[in-house]
Image: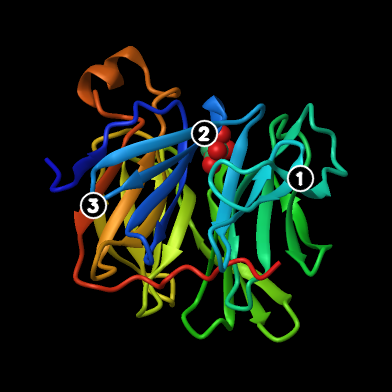
Amino acid sequence: MTDMQCAVNAQAKLAECPRWDERTQTLYFVDIDSFILYAYDTKSKSLAHRKFDEEIGCFSLDEHEGFVAAFRSGVYTFEHFNADLKPYWLASYDQKTTRFNDGRCDAKGRFLAGTMYSPKDAFNGALHQFSQGKETLIDQAAWTSNGLAFSPDNTIMYYSDTPNHVVYQFDYDLESGVATNKRIFIEFPRGNGRPDGAAVDSEGNYWSALYQGQRVVKISPQGKILEEYPVPATYPTMVAFGGTDMQTLFVSTCRGAQTEEELKQFPEAGGIFAIETNVKGQIEPRFAG
Ligand SMILES: O=C1O[C@H](CS(=O)(=O)O)[C@@H](O)[C@H](O)[C@H]1O
């Protein structure tokens, strides 16, 4: 049994990247495999959506009403929810095997996004950083880039490689945007979930959605699992803090990977779930351009 309740019954194939807009009390999220960006207005309980021509992996809000978003074919900006896309960086990788997957902004407004390399026969998944019109390659050694998050003091960057069951830490220099000293933060045993999307709370704990693990785990900065939160879906994909007090944990989930049996057990899989916590999340930094 879980206290987690379905906040948005989106029935998404692959819901990902929940993002809380504290200015409008809106929860944005994507359905990667349906090419859709959603906007859930928590005040009116209305759900808007926009369908693109390709997978949208992740996005951040900007300082105005706009977005920066990472798709299969590259990174684009748009000035408001329904505005035309403006190319920012076109993919230098093979789009037949690779797409963007997970990302967010650092506290200086640089957008960082990682790619998923589907063949998983080489470590071609990469982490890219976008700022002032330029792209910088941060790391290239993954199958599925995921779990990107920053500590409250911005000195630690977290980054997971889901199918390899590992979350890394880097030292992060916020002034330069340089990440160094990559090391293993935590590894998960095979067969009981693998680290997908994540968020760091205001106390520095790393909250990881365990894909195929049917739960979210709260991990201390030292790598100790402190709490586990069951999710009514086999495949949690990402978490985000929000709500009027920033203490609501939103969890996106995947429906497309569930078996018929799992769909009978979890009929709201593909939705966004929510649970009240006793800790505040961090307000998401916005893209600076
Ligand atoms: O975030 C994601 O990760 C999953 C997990 S895995 O790469 O299969 O281990 C992936 O399937 C999904 O498409 C991706 O968005």
What residue lies at 71% left-to-right and 36% top-to-bottom? 72
Mark 3: which amino acid?
Lys
x, y (%) of residue 78? 65, 49
Mark 1: which amino acid?
Phe
Query: Does residue 149 lie above or below 93 as drawn?
Result: below
x, y (%) of residue 226? 28, 67
- Viewer-proximal residue among 241 and 244: 244
What residue lies at 75% left-to-right and 58% top-to-bottom? 128
x, y (%) of residue 147? 53, 56
Residue holding disc 3: 43
Q: Quadrant of the rendered structure where residue 106 is? A: bottom right
Q: How far apart in space, not on screen, are marks 3 and 1 (Cα)?
A: 43 Å
Mark 1 lies on a secondary structure that is loop
Residue holding disc 1: 123
Q: How far apart in space, not on screen, are marks 3 and 2 (Cα)?
A: 20 Å
Is residue 146 visible to us here? no
Q: Earlier in the sequence, mark 3 or mark 1?
A: 3
What residue lies at 74% left-to-right and 63% top-to-bottom? 129
Q: Residue 50 carries which label?
A: 2
State the quadrant of the C terminus: bottom right
- Say whether marks 2 and 1 touch (CB < 8 Å): no
Mark 2: which amino acid?
Arg
